[in-house]
Image: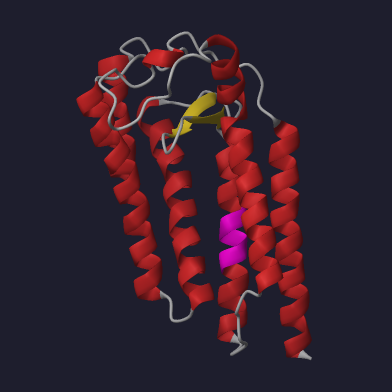
């Protein structure tokens, strides 16, 4: 699926960005936008199903899901770089996701998130191999959720700031809209990534991982 995802994006960029991908985003016909929306949702469901089928416990299912998601995301950029020499740098801005609103950010940000996911997966697999109960407790789940939501907030922050100032009277695109996707932000060019929110979210996630390692280490003694 890694190369397929990159191939689809390459086709879309050839259609909508024949001179090269850049902001502002080109409006996408509503029928194609709906297909893209469901394609992204289907990809997440597929990765989730892999985790559910491969993992034996809740923590393992979660671990394999985020591992697949992380590898998928990293190889997506690797294939884009190999096939069309994009992005030019890790600080190049990209449209990351469409659900429920556009997520934008420099390429390095989702790569950092993917690396964090892989590390967490390796920790869970490592303790599973040692026959330790790898259950993630309530506090750890809470911190992981809080950190993840904070990271997501950093991805949508700039978009919301622009939309609030320029298109406050317009409704964001939804599946039921008849207008084109990105029509309401056809003049949007990313201004500043909220690194403060992103780093805060990452630190919360890392702290939850540290608590997890600390607790698992007590079982090894």
Which x, y percent locates residue 221?
79, 91
Q: Position of residue 91 (x, y in %)?
A: 61, 26
Residue 51 spot, x, y in % from top left: 40, 67
Q: Is residue 158 visible?
A: yes
Q: Which residues are magenta?
A: 116-121
Q: Residue furthest left?
A: 31
Of 100 and 109, nearer the camera is 100
In this rendering, the answer to whether 98 lies above or below 69 is above
Residue at 74 percent of width and 89 percent of height: 220
Residue 119 on the magenta segment = yes
- Can residue 1 be seen here? The reply is no
In the image, 98 versus 92, the foreground residue is: 98
Q: Is residue 22 left or right of residue 139?
A: left
Residue shown at 48% from the left, 45% from the top: 74
**Which picture quadrant has residue 13?**
top left
**Quick check: 118 above or below 190?**
below
């Amino acid at each position: 699926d890694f190369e397929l995802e990159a191939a689809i994006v390459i086709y879309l960029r050839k259609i909508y960005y024949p001179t090269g991908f850049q902001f502002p985003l080109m409006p996408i016909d509503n029928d194609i936008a709906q297909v893209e929306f469901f394609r992204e949702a289907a990809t997440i469901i597929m990765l989730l199903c892999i985790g559910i089928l491969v993992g034996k416990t809740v923590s393992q299912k979660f671990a394999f899901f985020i591992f697949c998601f992380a590898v998928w995301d990293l190889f997506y950029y690797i294939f884009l770089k190999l096939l069309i020499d994009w992005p030019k740098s890790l600080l190049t801005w990209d449209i990351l996701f469409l659900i429920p609103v556009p997520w934008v950010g420099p390429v390095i940000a989702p790569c950092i998130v993917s690396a964090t996911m892989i590390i967490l997966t390796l920790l869970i697999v490592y303790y599973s191999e040692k026959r330790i109960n790898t259950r993630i407790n309530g506090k750890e789940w809470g911190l992981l959720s809080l950190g993840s939501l904070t990271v997501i907030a950093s991805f949508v922050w700039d978009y919301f700031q622009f939309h609030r100032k320029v298109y406050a009277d317009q409704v964001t695109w939804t599946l039921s809209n008849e207008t084109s996707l990105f029509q309401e932000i056809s003049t949007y060019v990313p201004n500043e990534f909220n690194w403060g929110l992103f780093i805060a979210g990452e630190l919360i996630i890392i702290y939850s991982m540290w608590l997890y390692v600390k607790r698992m280490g007590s079982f090894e003694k």
